[in-house]
């Protein structure tokens, strides 16, 4: 498994904590920035990480900003990305199990590092259930195809 992880300035400290956690779990990742707490624009980093997921160079993306909302909005504009903003483990579990989310978004200003680790672990360790849920994912993909032809 390989992840693409990114943040803006508001999520930088939590991103660094998640990198340490991933290293302790021997999970490979690519850090797509930012590299400091200097003010920057979250769409730049969300796009970079999600491109790796789109291209199959990363299995999942992890995006962190102040609330997680900006990263989530940006990621969900990209073809094939199903990003979910999660602030607890229940949502992290079911967004993988039912929605086959491939990008996890978190808010550093609303989620502490300990909880963020649990959310990340739940997201990464929950398989997609398929079945009736695949039909729904297929419908989302069809909407995406139609929308990009408008």
Image (cartoon, rainbow, N blue to C red):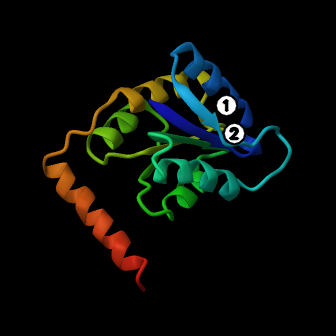
Q: Nearer the viewer, residue 107 or 49?
A: 49
In the image, 28 versus 20, the foreground residue is 28
Task: State the residue at coordinates (66%, 24%).
Answer: 17
Mark count? 2
How far apart are the alpha carbons under marks 2 and 1? 5 Å
- In the displayed orientation, state which residue is furthest to the right: 38
Q: Residue furthest top?
A: 24
**Which residue is found at the position 44% from the left and 55% from the top?**
81
Vertical comparison of 90 with 78: above or below: above
Left or right: 81 in relation to 98: right
Q: Which residue shows up at 49% across the image and 32% down it?
A: 2
Instruction: Judge the density around disc 1: few (<14), some (14-19), many (≥20) Cα neighbours within 10 Å.
Output: many
Residue 44 rendering spot, x and y as whole percentages: 69, 56
SS for tag 1? helix
Residue at the location (57% across, 13% down)?
Answer: 24
Q: Which residue is mark 2?
A: 11
Are the residues tagged 2 and 1 within 8 Å (C-beta)? yes
Mark carried by residue 115: none
Return the residue at label 1.
14
**Quadrant of the rendering where the C terminus is positioned:** bottom left
Element assignment for label 2: helix
Q: Position of residue 85 (x, y in %)?
A: 49, 46
């Amino acid at each position: 498994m390989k992840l693409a992880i990114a943040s803006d300035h508001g999520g930088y400290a939590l991103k660094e904590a998640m990198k340490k956690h991933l290293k302790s779990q021997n999970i490979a990742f690519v850090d797509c920035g930012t590299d400091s707490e200097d003010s920057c624009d979250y769409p730049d980093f969300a796009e970079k990480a999600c491109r790796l997921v789109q291209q199959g160079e990363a299995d999942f993306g992890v995006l962190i900003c102040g609330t997680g909302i900006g990263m989530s909005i940006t990621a969900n504009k990209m073809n094939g990305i199903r990003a979910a903003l999660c602030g607890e483990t229940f949502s992290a579990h079911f967004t993988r199990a039912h929605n086959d989310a491939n990008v996890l978004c978190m808010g550093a200003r609303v989620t502490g590092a300990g909880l963020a680790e649990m959310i990340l672990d739940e997201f990464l360790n929950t398989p997609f259930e398929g079945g009736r849920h695949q039909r729904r994912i297929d419908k989302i993909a069809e909407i995406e195809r139609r929308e990009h032809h408008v």
